[in-house]
């Protein structure tokens, strides 16, 4: 039997009803905050990711699906291509390519779509997964560096999770400073790691050389006491970064968004600067991050674009769904009316009735004239229908139908012309 590839999965009803409820709430809220959708390609030039996410990150060094795409015509060049492991790089590439900065205004962009990483599949970790993300990016003159943007973005996330009915989330907040701060902090980490790194895992031994900041991401239990004693990034922030972070915190306090400072949270992508954050949820087990994000003030320049500070996040939609389900959320869209044709020649009448109801905006489904009344009731209940409409010879002749409310068992005779009005109630 052919099966879905390892790390990929089919999303089936009724789960997809919950996915759709989440996505429509997301679109509704993002519109309320004046975001507009952007859709970028699912694959890009490999160098887009190595130059933005960073060569030394787990994503680029071992998780990307990359292939050499042969030239098929004289006019084409051979090229290394990669399935996108994340979407911020693609958004910023598009921002530069289409000169969105020329408007001089802030761009508030959002996306919903699949991302791909070759990771070890487990609960909440897949090779094809879905992200819902948003970015605020623009020239500094449009206020893109303002801490108010950070606070606005975080407040929107809190509102989104609250309106989805997700309780029990926690906002973990940190600042990783600017490139200079990070260089000094990396240097300090290198020094501090020198005498202890031989006791750490092999990954940390490598990271200590190539990208010491990544040591803080280590999940190996034996390494944790060593990591706890390493220098803290807050001591290495310069004055402007310190003030920026204080302003973000002050605004979150003012609007009442709760957060916890987590100095170890440095995020797994190299482009982050200043504010970084994750929202975690207890119902997720080891993969506790529902979403992550941060500022990326130098990203555009690293892709040969103009200065365009920005901040964004990506929600792991798979994990958001798991978190909602762990709190008992479910969505099962049901039809309003189930139409039951009884006896020979009634299918066409049932179909016509379904047509009229659907055109009038009432959701409806219908059975087959070969089904007995008992079976029709069973099918109607399986479909979760609120009403069953019986279509027999007598009903058709009288143009009046028996309508039964499956919730309370009430049955009434309703003339065709009043059916829609009745079913809308
Ligand atoms: P993690 O530490 O869990 O690997 P990450 O830091 O690699 O997460 P980001 O690149 O920040 O993740 O992506 C943002 C969000 O996307 C994560 O918080 C998570 O919810 C989700 N996510 C990341 N990788 C996967 C995956 N392989 N499967 C499902 N969701 C994922
Ligand atoms: Mg990861």
Image (cartoon, rainbow, N blue to C red):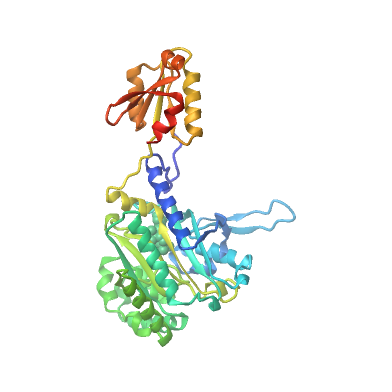
Q: Is residue 233 above or below residue 383?
A: below
Image-based side of 40 in relation to 217, left or right: right
Q: Position of residue 142 (x, y in %)?
A: 54, 75
Q: Is residue 206 visible?
A: no
In the displayed orientation, state which residue is furthest to the bottom: 239
- Name the one closer to the observer, 394 or 183: 394
Answer with the quarter of the image where residue 14 lies: top left
Q: Is residue 232 above or below residue 38?
A: below
Residue at the spot x=44%, y=35% of the render?
362
Q: Is residue 389 visible?
A: yes
Q: Position of residue 87 (x, y in %)?
A: 50, 60
Give the quarter of the figure containing the C terminus.
top left
Q: Position of residue 312 (x, y in %)?
A: 46, 67
- Name the one closer to the observer, 183 or 284: 284
Give the quarter of the figure containing the N terminus.
top left
Q: Position of residue 325 (x, y in %)?
A: 31, 48
- Name the one closer to the observer, 68 or 249: 249
Q: Is residue 167 above or below residue 335?
A: below
Answer with the quarter of the image where residue 187 lies: bottom left
Answer with the quarter of the image where residue 396 lies: top left
Q: Is residue 74 above or below residue 57?
A: above
Q: How many marks?
A: 0
Residue at the spot x=41%, y=87% of the render?
239
């Amino acid at each position: 039997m052919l099966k879905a590839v390892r790390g990929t999965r089919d999303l089936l009803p009724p789960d997809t009803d919950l996915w759709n409820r989440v996505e429509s709430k997301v679109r509704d809220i993002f519109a309320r905050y004046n975001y507009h959708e952007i859709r970028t390609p699912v694959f890009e030039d490999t160098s887009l990711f190595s130059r933005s996410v960073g060569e030394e990150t787990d994503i680029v060094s071992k998780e990307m699906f990359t292939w050499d795409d042969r030239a098929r015509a004289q006019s084409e060049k051979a090229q290394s291509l990669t399935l996108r492991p994340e979407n911020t790089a693609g958004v910023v590439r598009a921002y530069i390519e289409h000169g969105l900065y020329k408007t001089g205004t802030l761009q508030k962009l959002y996306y919903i779509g699949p991302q791909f990483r070759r990771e070890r599949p487990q609960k909440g970790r897949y090779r094809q997964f879905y992200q819902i993300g948003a970015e605020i990016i623009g020239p500094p003159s449009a206020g893109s560096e303002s801490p108010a943007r950070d606070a606005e973005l975080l407040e929107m996330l809190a509102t989104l999770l609250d309106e989805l009915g997700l309780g029990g989330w926690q906002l973990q907040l940190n600042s990783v400073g600017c490139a200079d701060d990070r260089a000094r902090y990396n240097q300090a980490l290198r020094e501090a790691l020198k005498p202890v790194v031989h006791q750490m895992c092999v990954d940390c031994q490598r990271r200590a050389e190539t990208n010491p900041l990544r040591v803080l991401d280590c999940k190996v239990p034996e390494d944790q006491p060593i990591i706890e004693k390493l220098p803290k990034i807050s001591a290495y922030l310069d004055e402007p970064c310190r003030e920026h972070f204080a302003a973000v915190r002050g605004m979150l306090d003012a609007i009442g968004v709760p957060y916890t400072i987590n100095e170890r949270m440095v995020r797994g992508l190299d482009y982050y600067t200043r504010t970084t954050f994750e929202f975690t949820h207890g119902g997720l087990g080891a993969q506790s991050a529902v979403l992550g994000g941060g500022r990326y003030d130098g990203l555009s320049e690293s892709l040969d674009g103009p200065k365009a500070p920005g901040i964004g996040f990506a929600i792991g939609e798979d994990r958001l769904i798991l978190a909602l389900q762990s709190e008992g959320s479910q969505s099962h869209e049901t039809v309003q009316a189930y139409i039951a044709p009884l006896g020979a020649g009634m299918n066409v009448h049932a179909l016509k009735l379904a047509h009229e109801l659907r055109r009038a905006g009432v959701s409806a489904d219908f059975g087959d004239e070969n089904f007995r009344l008992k079976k029709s009731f069973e099918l109607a209940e399986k479909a979760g229908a609120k009403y069953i409409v019986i279509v027999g010879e007598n009903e058709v002749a009288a143009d009046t139908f028996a309508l039964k409310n499956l919730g309370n068992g009430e049955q009434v005779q309703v003339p065709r012309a009043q059916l829609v009005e009745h079913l809308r109630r």
